[in-house]
Image: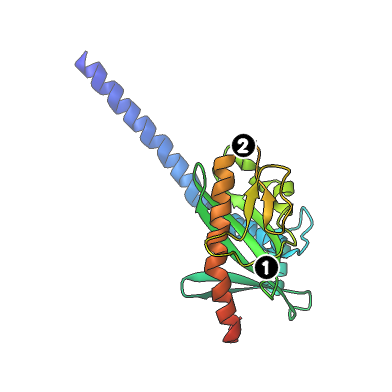
Amino acid sequence: MIRKRIFSVVYMFLLTFFFTGIVSGIYEINRERIAINEEIKLQKIILKVLGVQVPPGTLDARVRQIFGDRVKRETGQGRTIYRGFAEDGKALIGYVLPLFGPGFWGPIYGMMAIDPQLERVIGIAFYRHNETPGLGGRITEAWFEKQFKGKTLLPPEQEGRYFSFRPPGTAKAQNEVDAITGATGTSKAVERLIDRSLKDYLPWIAEQQAAGRV
């Protein structure tokens, strides 16, 4: 009886080790491809919020070329932004800053593009999250992201926020957007992380502009 139990334990251990090895091997083989896919995905998001059209089905090499011609990455003081340019590669059309913060079920990642004068939103997109499908997960839907396009970045008064999420269908002011029905936790989390990112990045970008760095 003891031998049978020992055999079962050893057998399960070896079986688990075998399949774990296979999965690890497959990951190692495809690690470079996975990294490239993630890079291309992020490049598409940045181009999207800048309003640069990349037709569906565009080859990865072409996406990289467009990104290389029209986007420049800038870093400093622990921050990273992207400068977007017109087709001539010279005229600045906007800045892209990262959006990051805790959501209702896990971290939320996104990108926001703002105009060179730091006064208007060009576009916004969320590309990674663990929010509930059909509820908080709707932050990636076009209707939600479209609300921000063209919004004026009004300086928040005292402890106010750049954007206020209102009950669905009631947003009217320039600094208001409709929250997601049934996803109060996610809506409040997105409201906070957008505000935190803008308050952190806008003054820094303004400083870099004044110094002629961006």
Residue 193 in the image: x percent, y percent?
54, 56
In the displayed structure, 125 sits above or below 64; it is: above
Residue at figure coordinates x 60%, y 41% from the top left: 136
Quarter of the picture holding the C terminus: bottom right
Q: How far apart are marks 2 and 1 (CA)?
A: 28 Å
Query: Circle 2 sits on which residue?
Result: 133
In terms of image quadrants, where is residue 54? bottom right
Q: Nearer the viewer, mark 2 or mark 1?
A: 1
What percent of the width, then of the height, locates residue 184? 58, 40
Residue nearer the viewer, 55 or 124: 124
- Element at badge 1? strand
Say which amino acid is labelled 1: Ile
Q: Please say whether residue 188 is visible from this viewpoint.
A: yes
Q: Where is residue 33 in the image (x, y as percent from the top left)?
A: 57, 55
Measured from the top left, where is residue 125 in percent x and y?
A: 66, 55
Q: What element carries label 2?
A: loop
Q: In this view, does 208 lie above or below 153?
A: below
90 horizontally vs 101: left or right: right
Residue in front for this viewpoint, 158 or 83: 158
**Placement of the N terminus among the 4 image quadrants:** top left
Sequence order check: which comes first, mark 2 or mark 1?
Answer: 1
| Residue closest to the eye, 197 or 131 | 197
Q: Which mark is residue 49?
A: none
Give me the disc on residue 114: 1
